[in-house]
Amino acid sequence: MKRVSNKEKKSKTAGKKSRKILGTLLLIGILFLEGCGMQKGQDGSGAIEGKNPAAEQENINGNHAAGGMEGNGAGAINGDDTATGENIESDIKKDYEPEDYMEYQILSSFFQKEGDMGFELVISKEEEDTERDVKVFVSRKEGELYCLKQVLYDKAHDGDAWDSNGLYLIDVDFDGEKDILVQNGHYGNQGAECYACYLYRQGRYEECESFTEILNASVDEKNELILGSWRNSASCHGWGMYTYQDGEYRLKRAIEQEYLLRDDSAQEDGEYEIQWTVWEDVDKTGESVINEENITDRFLESDDEEAVQEKIYARGSLWELSNYNRWNSFHKRPAFELSGRWFEKEIDGQKAWVALNDGAMIYFKVEGTETLNVYFRKITALETPYYAYIIDNGEPVRQLITESRIVLPDDKEHWVTVVVDGMTEFEDKWNGEIGVAFTGIDSGSGETEGFLPEKKRILFVGDSITEGVMALSSEANSNGNSATHSFPWYTAKQLDAEPYFMGYGGIGIVMAGSFAPCADMLDHLSAARPVPKEEMPACDLAVINIGTNDHEVEPEVFIEGYKEVLQKLHEIYPHIKIFCMIPFTQLHSEDIKAAAGEFPWCEVVETAGWDITYTDGVHPDAAGAEQVGKRLAELIGKEEGWQQGI
């Protein structure tokens, strides 16, 4: 082990700052001890040989390291790799300066702040050794100083496992106190994630080894569960729910999906079906065991497709496997989440997400900046579209997609929703895929993280009235069209739900308009992009407002076409009610009643006498759309038992 003098160390520190090892290479200098911490002074801190680490970091930029101190001062706990700064002042000499110390290099450093506590993850290595020591330092702010409270983690790991800087402050035992998770690498041929876990206990953090057994962990705060998932093979996947009891995490229930050949043959083109196996109360004895004794259900997906949807995929169900956000493991959380009819497309060599109708949304939370930029590419041939942004629970602010800058109230955490709000009706959407192209977010010094609202979702199927065409003026262009001034927007807001827009100008049961007839529109993002049923978003109910454009369509043709649309919707969403609105013009009102009356899962919505105001006699203006939203929300609230009037 190499040792150097203070003079040699200072010289080396100045000379090596330009080196790069997994990023910027920083050498660690000396910090002087004073009071409960160390004197404010040089950048970095020396690592002092010994097995009772205590150290100080000077600021929160994540560029300073901390080392260990030899001795048995008040900060040392029985020679462990833990220390506290609670009473350090009385036992550490202010003039203490080591004659020599180990030289460390910071390979990665990450800082998070929670209230008056600071948490830093430092990956370091001794210069003449190939091993890497992973250390987590927990610091408490006292004036301008950050004093070490406890060294939590000091084990050799493959440095590649730490590239994500995986340090998370989150309550995982649901006692109201933030605990610490440290990303502990990827294991097995499936690359499963696991975490070192430290639970907060009366001012200290205690390691909980049983959490490490949970693969691909995520947190279900509402139900106080830790969720885990695994992949046994390409044809077998499992999901588990864990509870914290008696000081450890135990598997409470599990479900497994396995693909089976129907004819038990190994034919390459053989037909498969899915077998589901469910275990309940798996861990009564304190040992997680999944075996034949605790199976509570086993069935083929084909046995009862509706029951499978209800139990396994549906929103609000026990498993809710369709909810990506619920099962998403920690470090994979993206910078934003998308909701709506988006698809990925490369445009001039740049990755973009394209939406062809108004109402598609982007969700993210941001912290650490007062401004950010949301970038779109103009791919329209005629007019520049608009987007709207909502900060926290504020009102929508509209601006052209060429105006990327969004100003935030301050640099604290804010929740931002971006809505594709207005594009002209006259672009080639169906064949040309002309709409809005979103390319990303630049938050500068801040950080963004995607989220999906934990609210009920309403699917709105329709034409230009559903899309918000002419809500702001009598012209069907980007200036006059607005999703955030449409009846779906106001309905969802009234019910504290999220709208999912599936509306295109000019379409009908027979008419194609700016896109395609309704039946084709349901499962296509464009002419060349069909959407498999399993990839459709989860929704809690559907509203269909169609027929206004089918002026010269015979009743029998309309009825059959309308029934086809209802059956197709029911096939995609077998467990939700469909509210069938009579067009505001009352066109095809009797036909819609006849078609919807054949299905028990349909509810006809009479719209006569709703006192709607219009911009052109057909399309509601903003006030008219709000009136429709209130009426429809009241009806849904009564029929479904949803709270309304938010």
Image (cartoon, rainbow, N blue to C red):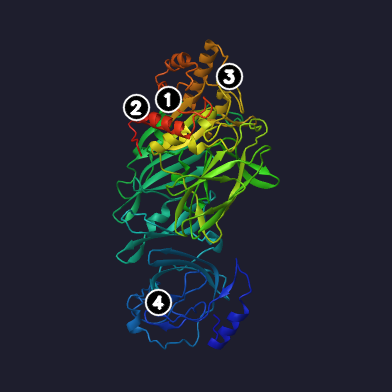
Q: CA distance from mark 4 to mark 3?
A: 78 Å
Report crowding for label 3: few under 14, some 14 to 19, many 20 or more residues within 10 A (C-alpha): many
Residue position for label 1: 579
As helix, strand or loop, the secondary structure at mark 3 comes to loop
Disc 4 residue type (three-letter): Asn
Disc 1 residue type (three-letter): Phe
Residue position for label 2: 639
Residue 445 in view (yes/no): yes
Q: CA distance from mark 3 to mark 2?
A: 30 Å
Residue position for label 4: 52
* Residue 420 falls in image quadrant: top right
Which marked residue is nearer to the observer: mark 2 or mark 4? 2
Asked whether the residues under the numbered discs 1 and 2 touch, taking CB atoms below 8 Å apart as contact, a structural biologist would say: yes
Residue 486 vertical position relative to residue 65 in the rendered view, above or below:
above
Disc 2 residue type (three-letter): Glu
Residue position for label 3: 510
- The quarter in which the N terminus is drawn is bottom right
Residue 314 in view (yes/no): no
Q: CA distance from mark 1 to mark 3?
A: 20 Å
As helix, strand or loop, the secondary structure at mark 2 comes to helix
Disc 3 residue type (three-letter): Val
Residue 5 vertical position relative to residue 419 in the rendered view, above or below:
below
- Please tell me which residue lies in front, 157 or 180: 180
Report crowding for label 4: few under 14, some 14 to 19, many 20 or more residues within 10 A (C-alpha): many
Give the percent coordinates (x, y) of residue 259. Answer: 51, 34
Asked whether the residues under the numbered discs 1 and 4 touch, taking CB atoms below 8 Å apart as contact, a structural biologist would say: no
